[in-house]
Amino acid sequence: MQQVINGFATPEATKSYADKMWAENPKLSPDGWRMLEDLTVAKIATGTYRMDGRDNQPQALEKALLSGLNLIDTSANYMDGGAEIFIGRILAKLIAAGKIKREEVVLVSKAGYIQGQTLDMYRNKPMSEMVQVNELMWHCIQPEFLIQQYESSCKRLGVEKLDVLLLHNPEYFLAHAVANHMEIAEAREIFYQRIEQAFTCLEGLCQQGKIQFYGVSSNTFGFPAENADFVDLAKLNEIAQTAAQTVWGRRKRPLLRVLQMPYNLLEMGVVSNVNTTARTFNDVEHVSTLELASRMRLSVLINRPLNAFSPDGVAYRLAEGATMPDISSEIAELAQAESLLPASELPRLSKLAPTLLEKTTDSLQFDHLKTTMLIPLLLQTITEAALSTEDAIEFVAIYQKVVAGLRLAARHQDGLRIEAVEKTLRNRLPQGVADLPLQQLALNIIASTPAVTSVLCGLRQADYVEDAVAVLENGDLPDVAAVFAA
């Protein structure tokens, strides 16, 4: 059985890690490092939303950890717990080999979603305050549930404790309440009462030495204040102070120290929407969420830096496109392999592929399709056909060539869709910067924004890690505001 990895990330070890990375790669810029409280972290971090160890993900995560990217963000529900298991396996391997130390790596996880195996546990015996968002997803931030999720996350990760635990999109309660005809004022009152209970629980975990800091990950921090599911950071700050006094028995700065929110070239609400308030010496000032976070000295993790949605809901991938591939030979090879399988009612990818080539509009859509349909179809096919290990390996290799080709076609569509935005962006950037790959520009613009601590990126492939390291090597952009200028 894998031995539990003890300890937290520490100020001394994370600084030593950064010094070691500089020594190994002198091209790294001093701008590439930030402080999450007293911990040194890279300004680009690994997000694990779609990571569970398949394909080349192990090599990518190892490369990230050995190249300077020492913050890993995950969640109890990512890949139905598979993300945490995968992270734990790679951490254990690298620590056992003496390549990294637990104290050098900042681990962030989140709790709140009830899906997959967790939903199976609670469907017939729900806890109080669980919210049924839909048939396949519930949500809860009740203290008993948070503790259970914390313990499960530690077990999957194989660690003694977490550095940061975040409430994961608690605004689901607000959306659910309003959809069920509750008045917004009443819904918000109940919502913030539940937040106080959760913060008191998380502050208690800090007091017990189980986590270092806590916070909130919300998709609605940047929404206009009048939106029903807007989460107000100023209100969270008040609640955290109450929770800290309850737990510690005295006035104390809360250990609410970390926020997570979406922000990218098309979704700028966290900086552009004046939706909350900050106390000044003798007054109250209306400010954006990111501005208030800066004044509160909070660490801010940004998600979805490359997957953007326009106001009309159109998805954009802020990365270099690809040449439209010709995968006719790959499809023919798969058709031949499928013809040798036993008769089945399952669809055949060789038959589906031409339609997918025609209908897929972007890589976001394709990645969802791959996770929800193509991979399950492959597993069902192998199981139903009762293939030997050798035959299964051969079939998977043929199948994956078609899947890879389909994703290149989706990336080609990404490039076509983003052409106008990319042209405008490059025209606003100084010489020497404008020619960098689009994904590096998109990441560095967000990471260069004042008050942003680290930008989370799904580093599932080695070339994605190389892009991230390139951003660490390039200094911060001096004038982010100019990029967003009308």
Image (tube, grey):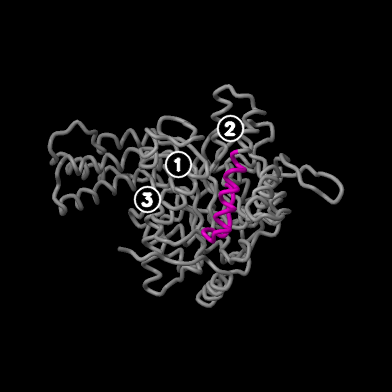
Kindly identify the amino acid type of the residue bearing the numbered disc 3: Gly
Q: Which residue is mark 3?
A: 82
Q: Nearer the viewer, residue 448 or 294?
A: 294
Kindly identify the amino acid type of the residue bearing the numbered disc 1: Leu
Task: Give residue 229's quadrant in the image.
Answer: top right
Q: Residues within 10 Å of mark 3 (few under 14, many from 20)?
A: many
Q: Main secondary structure of the magenta part?
A: helix
Please tell me the numbered disc located at residue 364.
1
**Does the rendering let one see residue 240?**
yes
In this view, the mark in front (2 or 3) = 2
- SS at mark 2 in the image: helix
- Furthest residue toward top: 181
Q: Earlier in the sequence, mark 3 or mark 1?
A: 3
Q: Nearer the viewer, residue 418 or 167?
A: 167
Kindly identify the amino acid type of the residue bearing the numbered disc 2: Leu
Q: Are circles 3 and 1 on residues that touch, CB within 8 Å?
A: no
In this view, the mark in front (1 or 2) = 2
Q: Earlier in the sequence, mark 1 or mark 2?
A: 2
- SS at mark 3 in the image: helix
Alpha-carbon span between mark 1 and mark 2: 27 Å
Residue 4 located left or right of residue 133: left
What residue is at 22 percent from the left and 43 percent from the top? 334
Q: Which residue is mark 2?
A: 174
- What is the magenta range? 194-216
What residue is at 15 percent from the left and 51 percent from the top? 391
Q: Position of residue 183 (x, y in %)?
A: 64, 24
Q: Earlier in the sequence, mark 2 or mark 3?
A: 3
